[in-house]
Image: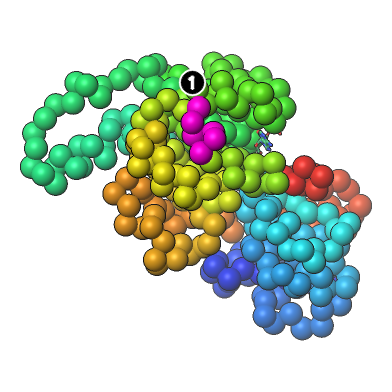
Amino acid sequence: MTLLFFSEVDRVDWWTGELNKAAPDIPVRAWPDVGDPADIRWALVWKPRHGLLASLPKLELILSMGAGVDHVFADPTLPAGVPVTRIVDPMMTAGITEYVLLHVLRYHRFLPVLEAQQRERVWKMRFDLHRLPAERRIGILGLGVMGADSAAKLAALGFAVAVWSRTEKTLPGVARFHGPAGLAPFLASTNILVCLLPLTPATEGILCAANFAHLPEGAFLINAGRGGHLVDDDLLAALDTGRIAHATLDVFHTEPLPVDHPFWAHQRITVTPHNAAISDPRSIVGQVIDNIRRLVAGRPLVNQVDTAQGY
Ligand code: NAP
Ligand code: GLV
């Protein structure tokens, strides 16, 4: 009964060290040292290589190392019927909220404009761009663990916050929209659009020209969801026309972002290397071990993913 760890981007020794500390009785193997595949009962993974999970004949549980699970479902050979869990971690949620606040405040206080002025040695107070927080409408796509925390913190700062989810929700102090019919009115009332959606067939490509057309002129975009939410060429076109004034992107179709991708050098795009929130094993291994022990004891899993919805 062994746990397999797979990630090609994380610090393997850090993770296996924290796992061993938290559960010395659970043997851990780190890919590529899989050993006998029949020993592996549980797999803790980030972007598993396609075919890896299918090659483990006794696999009973797939644990995503992150909040998102699209990287698991992307594997066309994913073994059917094996439960998938995801991470819900207060430190990760705080990381996303910090990222959202950082970039919302950057746009609210029009820092890119002031930075451009500095490069030109221009001293000009921008009364024309000044807005009160209540006059700045922040629209958050996704009202899950991440979206709800960002919405609450932005509302506490006095921003006019709206949220969009799949099902109807309640959240005090914010305007709520849901479902396909709610998307256009939600976008029409958004100055700064924040994407915190999971990537599923229903949300893929949602940041596209047709939806940008509903935004007011000169809107801002912050995408910390997934690269697959964005139609890259549609963003470049929207920046050209001024529909979108500036974009901050943490996630991309291909990661690392290829060196020749136009986003790198674009004057009105900020690129961050998928680090809005980091999966920190010190905070996360406890729930990984807990879910393994639950499975072994036949108790319900925590944060099990709804495979039909894909999140
Ligand atoms: P979550 O708790 O599962 O929440 C997902 C939210 O998206 C829910 O409000 C859900 O609506 C909504 N949603 C899903 N499909 C939808 C659809 N078709 N139409 C409208 N709304 C839809 O997820 P989370 O923990 O907040 O995480 C969200 C995502 O953030 C992750 O999947 C991941 O992609 C991203 N993330 C990125 C980073 C990073 O470092 N960049 C870190 C962590 C997470 P309902 O409430 O109606 O179900
Ligand atoms: C990171 O992107 C995650 O899904 O946790």
The answer to whether residue 8 is above or below residue 117 is below
Q: Is residue 43 above or below residue 268?
A: below
Give neighbour class at mark 1: few <14, some 14-19, many 20+ (Cα, 10 Å). Answer: many
Residue drawn at (80%, 48%) of the image: 307
Residue name at image x 37 percent, y 41 percent: 239
Q: Is-magenta flag for residue 257? A: no
Q: Is mark 1 within 8 Å of ligand 1?
A: no
Magenta stretch prevailing secondary structure:
helix
Q: Residue at position x 91%, y 52% from top?
A: 298
Extreme residue in the right direction: 298
Residue ID for mark 1: 189
102 versus 126 height, above or below: below
Identify which residue is drawn at 14% across, 42% down.
118
In percent of width and height, residue 20 lies at 67, 68
- Part of the protein shown in magenta: 209-214
Q: Classify residue 246 by image quadrant.
A: top left
Secondary-structure class at tag 1: loop
Look at label 1 and name its amino acid: Ser
**Quarter of the image where ligand 1 sits:** top right
Residue 83 picture location, percent across and down: 83, 54
Q: Nearer the viewer, residue 253 or 93?
A: 253
Q: Quadrant of the C terminus?
A: top right
Q: Viewer-proximal residue, 226 or 69?
A: 226
Visible residue check, residue 285: no
**Where on the picture, by quarter, is residue 14?**
bottom right
